[in-house]
Structures are given as structure tokens and as C-alpha cells.
Image: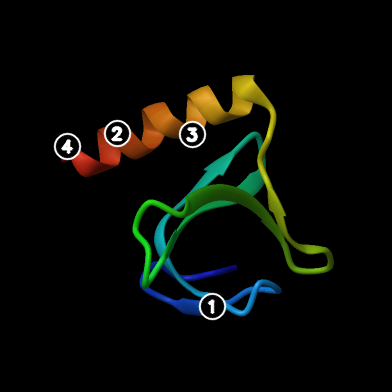
Amino acid sequence: MLEQSEILTLDDNKEYTVAFTTMLDNKNYVFLIEIDNYENNMFCEFDSESGLTEVTDIDVLEQLLKLYTEYVHE
């Protein structure tokens, strides 16, 4: 499982920080923000075997955005 504040270098050779982690439907999700360009961000599903997969399902993204918004406003 990835930890919040962890720094990752992805296949695009850019560094991202793990800004948020959560579980949804027994899956681990993370919100990544590129360190040098805060406009470049994404939600990804993390699996220890498959690694990171960017979330593209609108329904899942909506649920993750709601959870992230609640987290930010705590």
C-alpha cells in the first residue's frame, strides 16, 4: 500500500507525491500530484501486483472526488 506524502517517479519520468489514499469497494486508490506541475494530477488504483492504473471510470472518479473533498475539509 502506498503512503500519503510518498514520492513516486512514474513512467513519464516525472515525480509525483501521494496526496491522498483511500479504500473504495475493497480497492486501494491514491490521488497523485506532479511535484513540478500541480495541474498534472490523477486518481489511480493501486494493486501491489499490477502497480498503478489511472482511474477513467466516471462513477468511480465521482466517488473518489467526494471522499477527497471530505478529507480536505476535515
Query: According to the image, label 1 marks what residue?
Result: 8
Disc 2 secondary structure class: helix
Q: In the displayed structure, does residue 65 sit left or right of residue 12?
A: left
Dot placed on the residue nearer the N-terminal end, 3 or 2 = 3
* Image quadrant containing the N terminus: bottom right
Foreground residue among 22 and 64: 64
Looking at the rendered structure, which numbered label has been put on residue 43?
none
Which residue is farthest top? 59
**Residue 11 in the image: above or below residue 25:** below
Disc 2 from disc 1: Cα separation: 23 Å
Q: Residues within 10 Å of mark 4 (few under 14, many from 20)?
A: few
Report the mark closest to the observer, 3 or 1: 1
Question: Which residue is located at x 37 percent, y 72 percent?
Answer: 36
Query: According to the image, label 2 marks what residue?
Result: 69
Looking at the rendered structure, which numbered label has been put on residue 64?
3
Q: Which percent across, then down, holds residue 61?
A: 55, 30
Q: Which percent across, then down, holds residue 69?
A: 29, 33
Q: Do the residues bearing badges 2 and 4 touch, measured as CB atoms within 8 Å?
A: yes
Foreground residue among 8 and 28: 8
Disc 1 secondary structure class: strand
Q: Label 1 amino acid?
A: Leu
